[in-house]
Image (cartoon, helix red, strand yellow):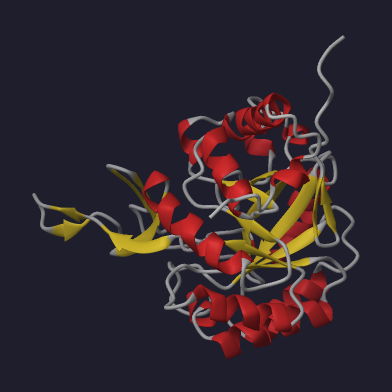
């Protein structure tokens, strides 16, 4: 007889996931881009590319720079806009056998609410991730994510208009992430996701010019994992809603650190640029760990950190 199967299901507030591993926004397209390499149905979910009301061209190139221990990006939330998303992407997403979370971005509180309203009744969408933490846009994004009052207003607007679970994505580029976390929890968020990228830059010493067309960008990858873990540690002790952890998760061992620290689920991003199958292998690695340690439900692993 084989070993007992591990129950990999987790509950992120009202959102049910078949396992705790979710592909992060901006690193997995709309699922179709990886379809020849990876079966998205093996994941707990995918977060599609950030969506705005109107199409965005994004920032001037170069938009991505590799650093010795991570990746800088300044995509600038380039996307096809709401109308094309509904007409072209939703039919594709409707065929995916996994949770679909739409990352939404606005220039104003009202725009966030308008996006939530426009996605009401769209069956292919299972939850909204509210991006108040992108460091690569001139207005909106991080401007909301660094002010607790503004973060709460955006959250309230989305919750008021949405008919799906609302996850708010927080920035590490703040003095105390717990202040923002408590503000959006009080405003009605069902869950949090953290962290977004850390602001950084790189310089070409030959030309003496910034390597990114936007000058600065968001740093992701292994360099930010210790920061992400600490902010997760702080946040899960400050709120009562579930948290998705992310930031430098490159393999199953990293993912386990996030779960043990208190994440209910986790997102994998930069690792996809190294290995498109990274998320699938992380799911398998978590399951193997649970089996080896006699853990029947992966949910029981969350928050078992001994301090």
Q: Is residue 77 visible?
A: no
129, above or below 22, in the image: below
Q: Nearer the viewer, residue 184 or 39?
A: 184
Left or right: 49 with respect to 223?
A: right
Residue 63 image position (x, y, % from top left):
37, 53
Q: Which image quarter: residue 185?
A: bottom right
Q: Nearer the viewer, residue 184 or 112?
A: 184
Q: Which image quarter: residue 156?
A: bottom right
Q: Is residue 290 visible?
A: yes
Q: Which image quarter: residue 188?
A: bottom right
Residue 174 image position (x, y, % from top left):
44, 76
276, above or below 199, in the image: above
Residue 209 image position (x, y, % from top left):
16, 59
Left or right: 228 with respect to 187?
A: left
Q: Nearer the viewer, residue 168 or 226?
A: 226
Q: Residue furthest bottom?
A: 149
The quadrant of the rendering that contains the N terminus is top right
Q: Nearer the viewer, residue 41 or 221?
A: 221
289, above or below 236, in the image: above
Residue 94 image position (x, y, % from top left):
85, 46
Q: Residue furthest top?
A: 1
Left or right: 20 with respect to 214?
A: right
In this rendering, the count of numbered labels is 0
Residue at 90% over, 56% down:
123
């Amino acid at each position: 007889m084989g070993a007992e199967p591990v129950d990999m299901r987790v509950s992120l507030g009202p959102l049910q996931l078949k396992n705790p591993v979710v592909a992060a926004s901006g690193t997995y397209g709309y699922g179709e881009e990886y379809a020849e390499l990876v079966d998205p149905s093996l994941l707990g979910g995918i977060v599609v590319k950030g969506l705005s009301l109107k199409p965005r061209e994004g920032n001037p190139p170069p938009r991505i720079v590799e650093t010795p221990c991570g990746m800088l990006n300044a995509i600038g939330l380039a996307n096809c806009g709401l109308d094309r998303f509904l007409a072209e992407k939703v039919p594709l997403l409707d065929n995916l056998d996994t949770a679909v979370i739409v990352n939404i971005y606005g220039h104003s509180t009202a725009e966030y609410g308008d996006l939530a309203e426009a996605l009401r009744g769209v069956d292919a969408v299972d939850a909204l991730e509210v991006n108040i933490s992108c460091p690569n846009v001139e207005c909106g994004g991080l401007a909301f994510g660094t002010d607790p009052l503004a973060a709460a207003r955006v959250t309230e607007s989305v919750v008021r208009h949405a008919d799906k679970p609302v996850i708010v994505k927080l920035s590490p580029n703040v003095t105390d992430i717990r202040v923002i976390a408590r503000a959006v929890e009080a405003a009605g968020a069902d869950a949090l996701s953290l962290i977004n990228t850390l602001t950084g830059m790189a310089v070409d010493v030959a030309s003496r010019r910034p390597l990114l067309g936007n000058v600065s960008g968001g740093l992701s990858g292994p360099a930010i994992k210790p920061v992400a873990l600490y902010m997760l540690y702080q946040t899960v002790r400050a709120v009562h809603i579930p948290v998705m952890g992310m930031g430098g998760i490159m393999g199953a061992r990293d993912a386990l650190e996030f779960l043990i620290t208190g994440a209910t689920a986790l997102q994998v991003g930069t690792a996809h640029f190294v290995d498109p199958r990274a998320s699938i292998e992380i799911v398998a690695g978590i399951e193997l760990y649970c089996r080896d340690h006699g853990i029947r439900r992966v949910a029981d692993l969350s928050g078992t950190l001994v301090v």
